[in-house]
Amino acid sequence: MAKTHYTALRRRTVLITLVVLLSVFAILALGTGTIRLSPAEVLSALSGNGSQRDQLVIGSIRAPRVLTAIGVGAALGAAGASFQSIARNPLGSPDIIGFTTGAATGAVAQIVVFNAGALATAAAAMVCGLLTAALVYFLSYAGARTGGQRLVIIGIGVAAMLSAANTLLLAKGDADLAAQANLWLTGSLGGRSWTDALLVLLALVFLLPVLLWHSTGMTLLEMGDDAARALGVGAETVRRVTIFTAVCLSAAATAAAGPVAFVALASGAIIRQLIGSRNVPIVPAALTGAVLLLGCDVALQQLPMQWQMPIGMATALGGGLYLLFLLTRTPARR
């Protein structure tokens, strides 16, 4: 009883801390830019009492960027925690097992081959992310179920092939369009519009409740399919619904900001260590992803101009180190 109370208290403390950090990072991000604003000026502008200039800068330029960062981070965090639970493997992340790469392939093809606009590029990213998930799922389907280890390995293979296809499209396409696609592939929060923010925030509104509804089923699946079925859980049904929902979230995040590596991988693993609970931490992982991405964006904007880099490149550098840590310190669960 005491242990249960301690776990609940620990979870609440972590959640409150994450919300506070997210609020602080949001205020800092809204005040960061060519026109520097103090936290007091940011709050005044948000309440409608600031100067017209401050309200214009925040409402037209910085708020879409901040909300896109929060939405993308939350979507990737929730999707990453779900995939890690389904695969019963800390490497079960949409960017590791190919779903993000598949979304990127659709976007690159639209840009390089069809010279498509932002809306068509986002739609192609979502469709190809779903098609990649379907391919990985059916290739890993064996013995009337999808094995966790098999899902990860096949996903890594599919990701490698899609990455090669992306390189081929960039090499054979028009130089100007290839440069545009290559810029998209770095993942960026620069120049985000309200359309980008609304895309990923609407995906969260509609899809996050689905993952929450199936979170108990995912938790039981971590004990194995046979144990889950004995407790009345339709193992494969939960897995299919969860994969579809998590892929839609990661595809929406990729469509809004381009490929952002390792946020999904890190969020689930970090929050499990912090809250110490066996339940699948959907909301805590979403908050962790939002804090990681927005915090990284704030830190990057403080760097000198010559050290500036797209957010996707920064998360790839940091996430690569985290991946090496997982590979060398954490044994894969079967």
Image (cartoon, helix red, strand yellow):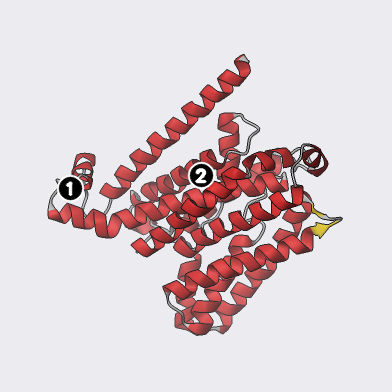
The image shows residue 124 at horizontal and vertical percentages of: 54, 72
Viewer-side residue, 21 vs 172: 21
Q: Quadrant of the C terminus?
A: top right
Left/right placement of residue 72 relative to residue 159 reads left
Report helix, strand or loop for mark 2: helix
Q: Is residue 34 visible?
A: no
Sequence-first tag of 2 and 1:
1
The image shows residue 301 at horizontal and vertical percentages of: 34, 51
Do the residues bearing badges 2 and 1 touch, measured as CB atoms within 8 Å?
no
Classed neighbour count for the residue bearing mark 1: other residues with Cα under 10 Å, few (<14), some (14–19), many (≥20): few
Q: Mark 2 sits on what residue?
A: 286
Q: Mark 1 sits on what residue?
A: 48
Q: Amino acid at mark 2?
A: Ala
Image point 44% across, 56% down: which residue? 202
Left/right placement of residue 51 relative to residue 299 reads left
Image point 65% across, 39% down: which residue? 216
The image shows residue 279 at horizontal and vertical percentages of: 63, 35
Viewer-side residue, 58 vs 5: 5
Image point 53% across, 28% down: which residue? 11
Q: Is residue 277 above or below residue 312?
A: above
View extreme (front): residue: 232
Gap between marks 2 and 1, in whole Å? 29 Å
